[in-house]
Amino acid sequence: MWFEQIQEVCVATNMQVEEHRQAFGGYQSADTTTMQICKDKPKQGVTQHTASPEYIVESQTKRQAWAVYFIETLNAPPSDEWTTYRGAIWSIMKTFSVPSGSYGSVLSVLQDVAECAVAGVAYAGEPKQTGGLNKLIELSSIESDLIADCMEWGWGLRETTHMVNQLRLSLNRMHVGTSAV
């Protein structure tokens, strides 16, 4: 598994060391302030890097883990059981020590998994695009070049937005607000 291949020693708190030792079967050193996320003993003289264990796993991997747990362990309960007391979301948050402020993120993952199941495609754990109309202007587009030119000329945000919208109108594209510019 991936955690058996990691050879760096990370500085962590005692609680993080214990949690990861239990979760991954990793070695806990005598001073309990260093850990190695593998089944080997830490090598003597290895340079320690100050990295919190939660930063080792990417958010996409966490979403995939939640999805696998939802499907394999919880047997993908229907959506009316997700938000109930001790429902699927509660179980995922408890099992993975997800902060209470991330309730919406877990719900979003379950909704995405359900949509993928209906569509018959695999859930990849990709993050959703956030933001709205400000994503309409791509960095390598003519609008982006126009924005750069207008700003270099010292034009204000409203004037630049007006020019961008005039260009988009001529190209039969939807207008954008100042937040997109």
Image (cartoon, rainbow, N blue to C red):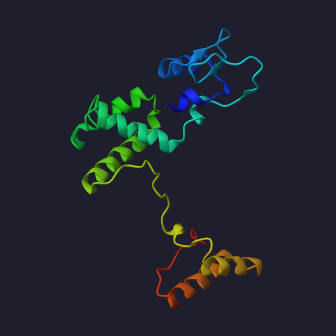
Q: Quadrant of residue 71?
A: top left
| Residue 31 screen position, x and y as percent | 68, 10
Q: Nearer the viewer, residue 124 or 14?
A: 124
Determine whether 112 is above or below 36 in the image.
Answer: below
In the rendered image, which quarter contains the C terminus? bottom right
| Residue 113 screen position, x and y as percent | 33, 47
| Residue 39 screen position, x and y as percent | 56, 19
Determine whether 137 is above or below 65 in the image.
Answer: below
Q: Residue at x 63, y 20 (%)?
A: 35
Q: Residue at x 53, y 18 (%)?
A: 21
Q: Residue at x 62, y 74 (%)?
A: 140
Q: Quadrant of residue 67?
A: top left
Residue 180 placement, left or right of 151: left
Determine whether 33 is above or below 55 in the image.
Answer: above
Residue 113 placement, left or right of 3: left
Residue 10 placement, left or right of 71: right
Q: Residue at x 24, y 43 (%)?
A: 79
Residue at the outermost bottom position: 170
